[in-house]
Amino acid sequence: MNKLSVSDLDVKGRRVLMRVDFNVPLEKGQVANDKRLRAALPTIRDILERGGRLVLMSHLGRPKGKRLPELSLKPCAHALAKLLGQPVAFVDDCIGPLAEAAVQALLDGEVLLLENLRFHKAETDNDETFARSLARLADVYVNDAFGTAHRAHASTEGVTRFMDRCAMGFLIEKEIAYLGEALDVPKRPFVAILGGAKISGKIDVIDSLLPKVDRLIIGGGMAYTFFKANGLEIGNSLVEPDRIDLAWSLLEKGGEKLVLPVDCMCTDRFDFDTRTVGELSPIAVGSIPADGFGLDIGPASVSRFAGILADARTIVWNGPMGVFEIDATAVGTYAVARAMASATDKGAITVIGGGDSAAAVEKAGLADRMTHISTGGGESLEFLEGKVLPGVAALTDR
């Protein structure tokens, strides 16, 4: 995707409006996980080191147009200041006289964080007047929020209509490079792994990936809809009855490319709300008892998947292999993470598509053994589906 990069911009002495994704968890008024702040640091530092006057904007949570003190971005300003080793100014609004005065006070190499964009409903409405107000704050625009690039909001799409030069930051550039290269010119064998609860959220991804991959591994709760389509008994396992015919058509279309689990970890007691699970036993697919819940892939499936991944040269993974929220049924997910780490060690390109997959890799301590971990969840899925991301499409062409 040939879009203008932040490195193409002359930022010396210029006001740079940068969309970041600081939608971070807060605990007791402090940032509990600064991963998203750290992800934006390369672009932030580049602009500041080159003498730009940086104005950062982000959303946090879903205030739906209300000013909620518990969703203020002020804690992010304190956390970012520590990471940068320099002051980060903060202003209590993102448009209007207060914001404009704070921007005008900036000197070269200084940074300001605006208040939560979604305190204004106009942000998610992609309101033209709101977008113009944002554009008035700066000379050039940079989007480095891959996590919101799939949404046409005022700060991601609308604002670009009123600014001459709109560029992508290094984070978005990296996301597109890895995800795009994996899809367009993959080293082969190219293996995709899709998990998660429901097939309905992954239909377009499966359709898009099938012609491109050498193998498509299916795990997680959605595998049971495929089992049902094959005429197998699944007991009390998760199923989408209205997607059984669709699953059958995907099985026919995918043929040998589609790889399903051959066994699962099964129990007769399961309550997700209380996170309780009975004794788990490996059960062959097709032998799940009537009162059984399939909650994770079994050891034979782990072995089969690991064998496929060991030979792969490009691997893209999105979605857990079981009920990842419970340790006892996250074993298969961690096994896939380890298999991918081993593949990376042997030279494979490994891309984690955000969400629970990224959380699993980080929790397992394997993040530094993956080629790339996407900061997006739904965003990386939409990219894999071949959809245009509005926040990227709106940027200036080179």
Image: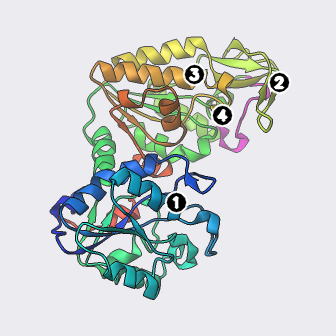
Q: Label 2 vs label 3: CA separation?
A: 19 Å
Residue 230 located left or right of residue 86: right
When asked about the image quadrant of residue 387, the answer is bottom left
Which region is colored magenta? 233-244
Q: Label 3 vs label 1: CA separation?
A: 37 Å
* Main SS class of the magenta portion in the image: loop
Within 10 Å of disc 1 (Cα), the crowding (few <14, some 14-19, many 20+) is many
Tag in front: 3 or 1:
1
Residue 1 lies, in percent from the top left, at: 25, 55
Secondary element at tag 1: helix
* Label 3 with label 1: CB-CB less than 8 Å: no
Q: Which amino acid does label 1 sit on?
A: Pro
Query: What residue is shown at x 27% (from left), y 41% (from top)?
Result: 181
Query: What residue is shown at x 55% (from left), y 47% (from top)?
Result: 32
* Label 2 with label 1: CB-CB less than 8 Å: no
Tag in front: 4 or 1:
1
Name the residue tied to disc 3: 332
The answer to whether 376 is drawn above or below residue 125 in the figure is: above
Of the residues under marks 2 and 1, which one precedes in the sequence?
A: 1
- Residue 366 in view here: yes
Q: What residue type is labelled 3?
A: Gly
Q: Which mark is residue 92?
A: none
Q: Which mark is residue 269?
A: 2
Q: Label 4 vs label 1: CA separation?
A: 28 Å
Secondary element at tag 4: loop
Instruction: Pick the residue in front: 358 or 283.
Output: 358
- Residue 386 in view here: no
Query: What residue is shown at x 17% (from left), y 62% (from top)?
Result: 50
* Label 4 with label 1: CB-CB less than 8 Å: no
Tag in front: 4 or 3:
4
